[in-house]
Image (cartoon, rainbow, N blue to C red):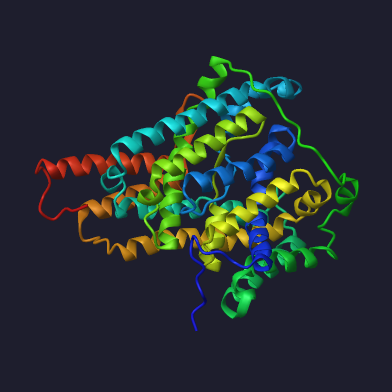
Amino acid sequence: MARKTIQVQEKVPFLQGIPLSFQHLFAMFGASVLVPTLFKIDPAVVLLMNGIGTLIYLVLCKGRAPAFLGSSFAFLSPVFVVLGANQGLWGQNYPLALGGFIASGLIFFAVALVIWKFGPGWIDFVLPPATMGPIVALIGLELASVATGMAGFTPDANGAYDAGGIFVAIVTLCTVAFGSLLFRGFMAVIPVLTGIIVGYVVSIPLGLVHFDRIAAAPILAFPTVYTPIFDINAILIIIPASLVVISEHIGHLVVTGNIVGRDLTRDPGLHRSLMGDGVSTALSGFCGSVPTTTYGENIGVMAITRVYSVWVIGGAAVISIVLAFIGKLSAVIQSIPGPVMGGICILLFGVIAASGIRMLVEAKVDYSKPINLTLTAIVLIVGISGVAVKIGTVELKGMALATVVGMALSLVFHLLERFGLVSGQTDI
């Protein structure tokens, strides 16, 4: 008997919705908190604004696009430049970065208005299935090393392996993998949450859970708010990262639509989705948080559980807001060992990669056509090879660079075909 699918706008019972929402929160928590940790700012303000930003996104998308907005990694490099090599100046220079975040949010908003004016039809030309399929696959593939690194499957700087961490990661991965196949009833839709709980419990006797941090955390904690400073030099350093996030955003929206069985680029529309991300990023900048982006981890959770409800995503956003003020609970979640999340992410990121292959299959891409073969081949190699292009302080590589290259090639090939300059054997 096939597992029941919970559709995008379908409500779930409150008592079932709580663990489903926590499942999404756990999936994004580690990565989202890592960014403010690197910037040496209060993670609580990021949890607060991620939750608020996600709720704004869901409203602007009319409750038709299930996505959680978490901390963007695309801005790390330029922000480090703004913060300065002298870490003693980081607290002093961080407000300068906030001005750049606000400007980036406004760029998202401007792009959204252009798409609203001219429509999303251009996507069919610059992102045909032969291009979009491998781009979606790259979203998961380029994160593969992150997942295996967290799981302990790669050696540390000394060439040593953490046997305990590897064991925990394998137990966690197997719990999710077999649970998604064997669980029945409500358990069938929370295999990720179950895997996290099992992995956490197994980690305790191995000494991987640090309870001293939980004990030291305050019961209530109020987020630290930072005030932005607008400096043209800092803004010019940071805003090129917007290109990376916009490329990432398009890929995430397409793969999410592929998973839920809807064309989200048209309903609610790519313009609404980008606008939601832009408003969230700009508002985060005004409040001292970091730029946001749609999260692949949450896309993977939906693909595994077949629970697409925006009510569940909204619940995760509300919990994130509450956590910003509850120090103890936030500390418990932060104490989840890396191998646990590594084991989870191996499957989550793999599911995203598989979604790209699924897109190629369902679109019936004909690889006897040279254009299709060429597009997929180049996009995959550009994305996997590690080749990078620098624009100022921003480095385009991986999926972001592959998206730009794939879009450019697709447009050129389409124009060549329109002008009758290609052979009859080619097709897009």
Residue furthest to the top in view is 232
Q: Position of residue 117 (x, y in %)?
A: 31, 35
Q: Is residue 302 above or below residue 4?
A: above
Residue sitting at x 71%, y 37%: 45
Pick whichever, 312 or 209, lies toward us: 312
Residue sitting at x 90%, y 46%: 216
Q: Is residue 92 above or below residue 134?
A: above
Q: Position of residue 67 (x, y in %)?
A: 53, 51
Pick whichever, 81 or 197, lies toward us: 197
Residue 201: tell me if it is visible.
Answer: yes
Residue 157: tell me if it is visible.
Answer: no
Direction from residue 307 to residue 319 in the image, left or right: right
Residue sitting at x 65%, y 68%: 16
Direction from residue 271 to residue 322 in the image, left or right: right
Q: Is residue 347 above or below residue 32?
A: below
Q: Position of residue 279 (x, y in %)?
A: 53, 35
Pick whichever, 113 or 30, lies toward us: 113
Tell me where residue 126 sits by quadrant.
Answer: top left
Tell me where residue 230 sits by quadrant.
Answer: top right
Q: Is residue 350 above or below residue 221?
A: below
Direction from residue 258 to residue 199 in the image, left or right: right
